[in-house]
Image (spheres, rainbow, N blue to C red):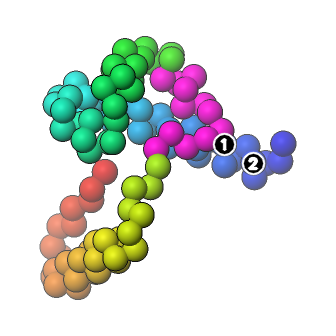
Amino acid sequence: MTATNTGVLAEIREVNLSYLLLAQRLLQEDRVAAMFRLGLSERVAEVLSALTPAQALKVASSSHLLCRFRFDDHVVLSSLADKGKAAAVSQPADAPVAHIA
C-alpha cells in the first residue's frame, strides 16, 4: 500500500467517523427529521443509534464512504452553488461568515 493510499484511507475513515457521529447526534435529537435528512430506513437508524464508540470506529475504518452524494439533479446542485456565490458576493468583507457543517 502506498503512502497516497494510506492517506486516502485515513481521510475516508475521518469522513466516515464524522458522518456516523453526526448521524447519531441527529437521531438522538429528532429521529424522524434525522431519518429524512440522512435518507435512512428505520432499521438502519436503529443500528446507527445503537453503535458503541468502538463499533463506530470499526465501521468508519471501512475503505468505502458510508455517506453518498444525494444531488443527482445537476439543476438542483447548480442552483445551490449559485446561491452560495450570490450570498458571498453580497456580504461586506468584514461580515461574519456562517459555515454549514
As drawn, 7 above or below 87: above
Q: Are marks 2 and 1 in contact (CB under 8 Å)?
A: yes
Q: Nearer the viewer, residue 7 or 27?
A: 27
Q: Position of residue 80 (x, y in %)?
A: 28, 72
Q: What residue did someone put label 2 on?
A: 5
In this image, 54 relative to 77: left or right? right
State the SS at label 1.
helix
Q: Secondary structure at mark 2?
A: helix
Residue 6 at x, y percent in the picture: 73, 43
| Span highlighted in magenta in the image | 56-67
Q: In the rendered image, which quarter contains the N terminus? A: top right
The residue under the point 51% across, 17% down is: 55
Q: Between 37 and 90, which is closer to the camera in this rendering? A: 37
Relative to 73, is 10 on the left or the right?
A: right
Q: Is residue 74 above or below residue 33?
A: below
Point 42% across, 38% down: residue:
18
Is residue 89 in view?
yes
In the image, 60 versus 39, the foreground residue is 39
Q: Nearer the viewer, residue 28 or 7?
A: 28
Q: Residue at x 34, y 31 (%)?
A: 41
